[in-house]
Image (cartoon, rainbow, N blue to C red):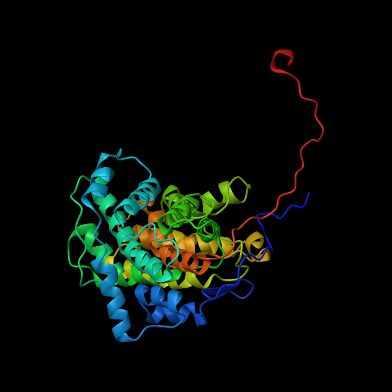
Amino acid sequence: MTDRGGLDGAVVADISTSYIDGSIGKLIYNGYAIEDLAENTSFEEILFLLFNERLPSRAEYECLRETVAAKAAIPDAVIAMMKSLPADTPAMAVLRTAVSMLSAFDPDAENLSDKEAAKAKAFRLTGQITTICAAWMRIVDGQVPIVPRRDLSVAENFVYMMSGDAPDATACAALNVYLVLLAEHGMNASTFATRVVAATGSDLHSAIVAGISALKGPSHGGANSEAMRMFLEIGAVDNVAPWFEANIKTGKRRIMGIGHRVYKSNDPRAGILRRHAEALAESSGERKWLDVAVKLEETARADDYFVQRNLYPNVDYYSAIVLYMLGLDVDMFTPLFAMSRIAGWSAHVVAQMGGRLIRPKANYVGPHDREFVPMDER
């Protein structure tokens, strides 16, 4: 049997959306360095870039921003369904179900061949997923969901819909950067899942539900939730060293958010998010969890095991701090990941439309020529 180890080394498509060189910590979206994009662009500009292979003009940006915002409201029936769910339903299960339900209210849902129609559906879903995430947070807290505003960006609308207050500039900047950094990342597990579904000729909503389902797995989208639970368990800066000795040096645990399957150098996204975590800490005056994360990183990077294996914080490590400081419950971290990755998923789905059915081979390793025995003789 050939063990492909999770399809390592298998090339399944030619893409232009993003490129990763993990050996030097390089990530680009359609040729643009992620550092430049994070510093200078909005999430809507990234959405435009992934579909059009160029950045928008100001007029094109405003048109797309308004399109996404104008279509971001979700039907009352979807809100009613969400309210009917137990409050302890995992947020990703809520998102998966709500997106599936939205297809019934999309008049163009079964248009399976028109790429322009697929783009329009993707833009609707981008805003609607933002609204679903904010609405579920309020429903769980016993509050009434807030309708999105047409004059706001995706990041601003989410911050607004969480509280109903005017969106804070520092919080919006941090969330926008998070959305930019997580929007696309090559042929990851959830992106591949969306392309497999799209290749069958299925609809866009089904493909995105497949991506959400894959992202729900803790080995993929749940890593920053686990990182935050780890920080909460440590509890304070003074506890970092004894926790590290008791859990990491003994081999009982591993540090969630340090190390990456692709990056064998610095994940460029981690440092950017750390800077925004610093800005949030300065703005709020609350540094506790950031200080815990920084101390744990310093402790790990001083240890030979982490140095020799080139293990650095990845995007999950400091995104956990950013999202927690924005006021999100840990259970909401992965839905926020989906809120960003809808951009990459949908661009891949549109690219896959009209392609061949994805049908890899598998090695059969079971027995041959077994003699059948009737049930009464077994």
Residue 28 at x, y percent in the picture: 52, 77
Residue 321 image position (x, y, % from top left) = 40, 60
Looking at this view, is 296 or 168 the one in front? 168
Depth check: give the residue in front, 91 or 350. 350
Q: Is residue 211 visible?
A: yes
Is residue 288 in sight in this rendering?
A: no
Lateral position of residue 266 relative to residue 291, left or right: right
- The quadrant where residue 155 appears: bottom left
Residue 231's place in the image compared with 66, above or below, is above
Q: Which of 123/322 is in front?
A: 123
Number of numbered tags placed on the structure image:
0
How far across and down, in percent of the image, does residue 5 sit?
69, 54
Q: Is residue 201 above or below residue 184?
A: above
Q: Residue furthest right?
A: 369
Q: Quadrant of residue 188?
A: bottom right
Residue under the image location 17 percent in, 60 percent down: 164
Using the image, determine if residue 37 lies above or below residue 171.
Answer: below
The extreme top residue here reads 376
> Residue 266's x, y, as percent?
56, 71
Q: From what the image shows, is residue 97 above or below residue 39? A: above
Which quadrant would the C terminus be assigned to in this image? top right
* Residue 366 falls in image quadrant: top right
